[in-house]
Image: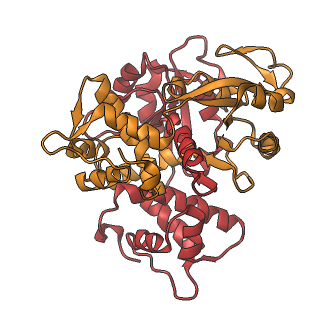
Chain colours: A red, B orange
């Protein structure tokens, strides 16, 4: 297996497809499939087989003629590239409706993201149980980053306080933030920020319904 | 302006970028900018200027030399392609934590999606107010589809009932579903289904943090 550091860097558009490959491969693994062809992967993701083969060569994977790709091997390789071949420690900030839903979202743990602590600023919520965690006050955040070795923060706070909370999070040394608040946060260089815009998903539905494109499921 | 029906069909990967162009253009509009270059759009989205120009030609937009693209004109064109130059009527099913958060999510209305009705199966929730709507029982769903002219459904129900609710929704004539339940729903041909997988966003953060790629904000 070639060292990924020896391979060309992976474009952002490819990285977004990697998660989609991973979900299809995980479905195949659950179904007991041992191998998969580029054609089959392509059909499930509405891509061309050539596109799939090109994507997979970015990380040194070449299908075997007449066999295709080994499902388990490819899952391991995709997780290695995505960095989810390890478990990341995540803090959730905001224990309102969205935060409560995210705290109970099973998909995070399945894919290698362990929620280690939940924070809120509301005294009414601090100390309450949420998905097995006692909600902590934000005053404890900086100490918890060190104690729990937190890697990422999921921000599910109201728009009015989002930038202040973000600044506090960055000040405490966190370098990866997933933001659900519908505003564009400012972060310094070196901090990775991903903004989740839930309306984008509805726009894709609108696009499909308007253009009457291909049917079938898509994951975003 | 060429009729979009005369243009080549837009690949799925391009349609996903259209929402990202739209958000950047809307930010520029709010900032009072009248024009934008392909280079500036590209820099904000971590794409190449050539990629942006290629994407925009899919719907017949060509920048003016030395001027770039007109922000307002491009917003209108992108919304037309996405089908959000009209308002879609949306029903939300599931008034738990996630449903409550989605009901209050301002981004939907801003982008052309109006929540017209909210449903739940729980008798304890029916009749309660949520974001200005009186929660209705699922028994009323089919009649409401006709009365309110519902286009899409956002499913925020527990995994155990998701397929049954989906079948009911499809049976009532809905042809577009945005599914937040973490399972792969089965829908007949002709029904558009988009599955929201929140772990994908964290995987992209993991990818950025692992590969130490470019900094800055990304929207997914």
Residue A73 left/right relative to A187: right
Q: Nearer the viewer, residue B153 or B205?
A: B153
Q: At x 23% / y 27%, what residue is drawn?
A: B33
Q: Is residue B115 shown above or below B213?
A: above
Q: Residue furthest bottom?
A: A66
Inspect this view and state whether residue B121 appears.
Answer: no
Q: At x 54% / y 66%, what residue is drawn?
A: A75
Q: Is residue A199 shown above or below A47?
A: above
Q: Is residue A77 shown above or below A118?
A: below
Q: At x 77% / y 44%, what residue is drawn?
A: B170
Residue A38 left/right relative to B157: left
Q: Residue B27 at what x, y percent from top left?
A: 33, 29
Residue B39 left/right relative to B184: left
Q: Quadrant of residue A100?
A: top right
Q: Residue furthest top?
A: A124
Inspect this view and state whether residue B189 appears.
Answer: yes
Q: Residue B203 at what x, y percent from top left?
A: 48, 50
Q: Nearer the viewer, residue B218 or A178?
A: B218
Q: Residue B188 at what x, y percent from top left?
A: 75, 55
Q: Quadrant of the N terminus of chain B?
A: top left
Q: Residue B149 at what x, y percent from top left?
A: 70, 30
User: Number of marks in the image?
Assistant: 0
Q: Nearer the viewer, residue B192 or B99?
A: B192
Q: Is residue B147 shown above or below B203?
A: above
Q: Quadrant of the C terminus of chain B?
A: top left
Q: At x 63% / y 25%, what residue is drawn?
A: B115
Q: Residue furthest left?
A: B66
């Amino acid at each position: 297996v070639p060292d990924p550091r020896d391979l060309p860097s992976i474009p952002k558009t490819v990285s977004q497809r990697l998660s989609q490959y991973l979900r299809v491969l995980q479905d195949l693994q659950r179904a007991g499939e041992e191998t998969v062809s580029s054609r089959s992967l392509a059909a499930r993701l509405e891509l061309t087989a050539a596109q799939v083969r090109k994507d997979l060569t970015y990380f040194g994977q070449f299908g075997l003629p007449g066999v295709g790709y080994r499902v388990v091997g490819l899952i391991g390789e995709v997780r290695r590239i995505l960095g989810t071949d390890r478990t990341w420690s995540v803090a959730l900030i905001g224990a309102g409706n969205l935060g409560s839903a995210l705290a109970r979202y099973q998909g995070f743990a399945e894919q290698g993201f362990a929620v280690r602590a939940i924070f809120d600023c509301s005294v009414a919520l601090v100390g309450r149980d949420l998905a097995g965690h006692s909600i902590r006050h934000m005053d404890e955040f900086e100490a918890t980053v060190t104690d729990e070795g937190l890697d990422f923060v999921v921000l599910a706070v109201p728009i009015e306080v989002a930038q202040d909370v973000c600044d506090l999070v960055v000040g405490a040394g966190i370098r990866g933030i997933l933001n659900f608040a519908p505003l564009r946060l400012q972060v310094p260089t070196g901090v990775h920020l991903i903004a989740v815009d839930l309306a984008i998903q509805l726009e894709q539905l609108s696009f499909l319904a308007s253009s009457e494109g291909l049917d079938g499921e898509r994951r975003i």
